[in-house]
Image (cartoon, rainbow, N blue to C red):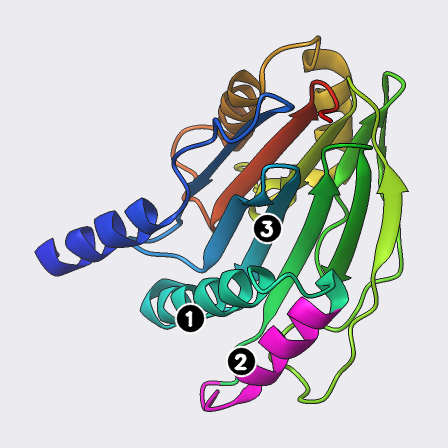
């Protein structure tokens, strides 16, 4: 038990804890593993002072195997991204590496984006992950796009990217299925509709940290006491405050 608690501490401390990356954005992310360690992970970092990376990912399975694969995947993806390759090539190369020596046949859903803070353009790849919620002109909606294959499922797969543009005041919200698939005592799912309604009703220009903490509380309230957390829960909020030049 002590070793697992130490492993949990090591894993959580490896994730980004510093979100004051740029005056152009308000950022926050958090994760709550269902077990001592988990397979969800997020990342956010600057490629340079004008280009931001955000990543949300979920490894299949739970516990120690998923946690070990998660650490491997995060290292690969960040390392390749820092070579300044196009985002589709970043995940194509990460996928090739993750397919190697994957005897446990684990896979990863991921949503990753490069954000240009000078003009608000966002280049992204969805590798089989839940659609993010995008706030534009004050309206919230799911960003429904064609999904690529999950990572670590097929060597040689070529990932394709998409794009959209954010304006100051717009917001991007990423999450794992631990949010939408949280259950209550009647085994009813929290669901995508409730998540979208929460964003519409609760997000009245509150900060990214307050938003994530309020959603976590809403998920816990929905589940109620005595209902065991079934899956890791992870979320990331990014609000574009201004453009930089």
Give the SS element for disc 3: strand
Residue at mark 2 to residue at mark 3: CA–CA distance: 16 Å
- From the top left corner, tell me how far across and down residue 24 is, in percent: 65, 23
Residue at image point 50% right, 44% down: 233
25 or 110: nearer the eye? 25
Q: Are marks 1 and 2 in contact (CB under 8 Å)?
A: yes
For the record, the magenta segment spans 89-104
**Residue placed furthest toward the left:** 2
The earlier-in-sequence mark between 3 and 1 is 3
Residue at image point 89% right, 54% down: 145
94 over 16 or under it: above or below: below
Kindly tell me whether residue 224 is visible in this rendering. yes
Kindly tell me whether residue 231 is visible in this rendering. no
Q: Quadrant of the N terminus?
A: bottom left
244 over 148 or under it: above or below: above
Give the SS element for disc 1: helix
- Residue behind mark 2: 98
19 over 183 or under it: above or below: above
The earlier-in-sequence mark between 2 and 3 is 3
Residue 90 among those drawn in magenta: yes
41 or 16: nearer the eye? 16
Q: Which mark is residue 72?
A: 1
């Amino acid at each position: 038990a002590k070793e697992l608690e130490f492993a949990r501490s090591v894993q959580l401390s490896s994730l980004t804890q510093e979100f004051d990356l740029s005056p152009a954005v308000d950022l926050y992310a958090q994760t709550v593993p269902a077990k001592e360690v988990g397979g969800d992970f997020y990342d956010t970092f600057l490629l340079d002072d004008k280009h931001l990376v955000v990543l949300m990912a979920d490894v299949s399975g739970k516990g120690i195997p998923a946690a070990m694969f998660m650490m491997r995947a995060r290292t690969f993806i960040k390392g390749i991204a820092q070579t300044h390759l196009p985002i589709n090539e970043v995940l194509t190369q990460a996928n090739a590496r993750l397919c190697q020596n994957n005897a446990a046949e684990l896979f990863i859903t991921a949503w990753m984006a490069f954000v240009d803070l000078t003009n608000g353009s966002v280049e992204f790849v969805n590798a089989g992950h839940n659609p993010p919620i995008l706030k534009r002109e004050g309206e919230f909606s799911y960003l429904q796009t064609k999904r690529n294959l999950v990572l670590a499922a097929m060597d040689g797969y070529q990932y394709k990217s998409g794009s959209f543009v954010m304006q100051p005041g717009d917001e991007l919200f990423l999450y794992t299925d631990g949010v939408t698939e949280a259950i209550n005592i009647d085994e009813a799912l929290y669901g995508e509709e409730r998540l979208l309604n929460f964003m519409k009703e609760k997000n009245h220009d509150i900060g990214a940290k307050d938003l994530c903490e309020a959603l976590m509380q809403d998920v816990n309230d929905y589940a109620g006491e005595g209902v065991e957390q079934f899956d890791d829960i992870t979320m990331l909020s990014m609000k574009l405050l201004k453009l930089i030049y």
